[in-house]
Image (cartoon, grey):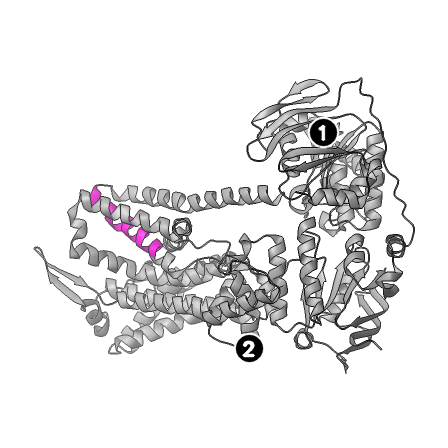
Amino acid sequence: MFRSLIKRNEFLVAVTIIALVLYIGFRNPVFYTYSNIFDLLRSGTVVGIFAMGVLVVIVSGGIDVSFTAIAVFALYSTVKFMVTYAPDAPIWMAFVMASLIGLGLGMINAFFISKFHLPTLIVTLGTLSMFHGFLLFAIGNQIIRNKLPPSLTAFARTALVSIQMDRGIANLHPAIFITIVVAIFTWLLLDYTMLGRGIYALGGAREAAERAGFNINHIQYFIYGFVGLLSGIAGMTFGALNRQANPQDIVGTELNVIAAVVLGGATLTGGRGTVIGTILGVTLVVIANNSLILIGIPPVWQRVVIGIIILIGTGLPAIQERRAGKAMVGLADM
Amino acid sequence: MADEIIRLTGIHKSFAGVRALQDVDLTIERGKIHCLVGENGCGKSTLIKIIAGVYERDAGEMIINGTRYEKLTPIEAIREGIQVIYQDFSLFPNLTVAENIALNEELAEGRRFVNWRNVYRVAEDALAQIDVQLPLKARVEEMSVANKQLIAISKALRQNAQVIIMDEPTSALTEREVRALFSVIRKLEARGITFLFVSHKLNEVLEISEKIIVLRNGKNVSQGNRSEYDNRRLVREMTGHDITTKRYTYTPDKSSEPLLRVDGLSAKDLLYEISFDLYAGEIVGVTGLLGSGRTELALALFGTLSIDAGQISINGEPVKIKSIQDAIAHGIGYVPEDRLTEGLFLERSIGNNVVVRIIDRLRGTLGFTDPRRVNAQIDHWVNALSIKTSDPSLPAKTLSGGNQQRVVLAKWLASEPNLLIMNGPTIGVDIGSKDELHEMMKTLAGQGMGLLVISDDIPELLATCNRILLMRHGRIVEEIQPAQTNENELAAKLIEE
């Protein structure tokens, strides 16, 4: 039981997180304050939503790098639309609109991937540029900050929990619930629906999945549509938390999210990855991104440290697997 | 009148003008084990796919369970209880054993949600039907080939299989696993399940089948009861001519230095105290079961398995072989078992594959390769090994198994090795080609090359080797003279503990 536990990637990541938390907390007790913990949750909110979408794509054996462009496209278009035509629209309208825009853009990815059987990386690299370029060129390139719709500003100010600290107030933003709901939904989808099992099947052996009777086209439309929809939600959440719609935001953080998912045990070759692992991967990346400064590692070095974590975190299991594989080859008398 | 479950008459099928099947008849009787035999490219796979509803026939009649089908879809075939187990098993390596068994059923029932308790119940049930126990929660990728096959069979049974069609089921199995598979099949036969095997391993065909169907070049040759066939007849009908195997006898001149001397070679947990000599002109067989160390021995000689103790000498000179480069420098060549991944660049041209090892020697002025010399080499080897291709610039993957193996051989022969290690020299090669490859091996030995043949194909060992070394648990336990044994005796020794 324990042996199979320590072999799991999740275990390795969890141990790393615990070690990191203990160490950072030991060196700088500020880490354990409510304001820091709430900050971490806030930082993990958007990455967490993105990561669930990316997990689903990676499990299916594909990759999507266009989700950041979809997010910012959905965010900026929605805010601009609201500012211009419906400044009094409620916040849920904003989320619905952003989700639908995201879904639509995701469908464009799905169309190219399933219709022309193009490699997913190529398609989404193309659409990443295309979506972002189109946004800047046709929709707008000015930051919207001052005349945000009031519903958005109000949402930004809400707090689930407010705790009075020595200096100021520590607020926990309810947006973390969006991430939690998305994660639970993704977990149920992947583990308890035939569609989810079809996504694993597709990532494990495409031809066998076809023979078994899975409709690969439908599954692919679902996957890229789902990523698009989550990206729309994530983009809107990002804008709400930051109280601005900047068309230059978000794009460029793709690899951060993909790294978190891969750290959590999803393999880029497909067929593998869990929601729990992804949550752990996101946690690790968020802590590394936000808290290393607490122990005196300057921000420029954080990227180096994250790089090292990714190399070790994904390299170790790969080496272990290769060792195990070699042993198998010996036994199988290859 | 026998109870016919499938009856095909006058089946024709062409692909882009090329005749694959011509006027083929096939009758499958309920509860019997049938074997469909024929060389690669004779139309076996096409015929199976027609029965499975994957291909549509051009002409002919098809009756399944008394129903005449004008056009059969894969779903209809499955509803009629026809299940095909392809060579890749159509399993999902990343999913558990249980899920692999139950998934198709869940899909067929049109479920939207997974009932995990049901998945485990179905899987347990399915494995119990064939009296097999496997860890239900283990991933399929951790299973051996034989276990994957059992998983595929139980999956088929769960879908109400009446007829199970297996494409080359034994090609990746060891002797003992073949036994285990056969006993499962006999058990299922006793319960009324019908089997159609596609195979070119004649001994197995003769052992397991009750009905034999022979195809050649897309046409029926014969169809009948097992008792009407023997090895000779099968070979003649499959290839169209008689193949008589001549044994290879050779007595080396032991006064000279051996080409290869291995003395006390050991590798932790894999090889123990391996010692033998191999003289120029000899073909020495190495055989043994899974994990007996036969492949490890080859790898140690080729520098890819590090050794802990022992001495290797070439022509009397002690040498150290620590890498493939060392092995090549000492004139050792290695034809791997898995030519698809280790022996060939499948996407590159046949010609490029032939000259890849000697490209350095084909340089002209200025250090660029000289196309005339390259082409001369390619032509020479394509002719010498009679590689059947219309154009050597086609990718290697366009060739049949036997011809691919010739390309691998040509690649090594071009570099003029003194010692050639061949691991499973004719795996996946059909019988006509196999015989020609065996003759080539004998010719090479006759020219003074030493050959070390690693194989568990007993007829092959007896047909090619002048000595056979039997390995068990990493040791050489016996040296066998082919002239003093026969297939049955050697087979018994092979599986002995």
Q: Residue furthest right?
A: B241
Overall secondary structure of the magenta section = helix
Q: Which residue is mark 2?
A: B109
Q: Residue at x 46, y 70 (%)?
A: B117
Q: Residue at x 60, y 45 (%)?
A: A332
Q: Which residue is mark 1?
A: B363
Residue A143 in picture, x, y percent from top left: 28, 62
Q: Are marks 1 and 2 in contact (CB under 8 Å)?
A: no
Q: Is residue A139 visible?
A: no
In front of the other: B127 or A274: B127
- Find the magenta span and give its range: A280-296
Few, some or many residues within 10 Å of mark 2 (<14, 14–19, 20+): few
Which chain letter matches label 2? Answer: B
Residue B297 in picture, x, y percent from top left: 65, 34
Identify residue type, mark 2: Glu
Please say whether residue A252 is one of the residues in the magenta stretch.
no
Residue A234 in picture, x, y percent from top left: 33, 65
Which chain letter matches label 1? Answer: B
Residue B32 quadrant: bottom right
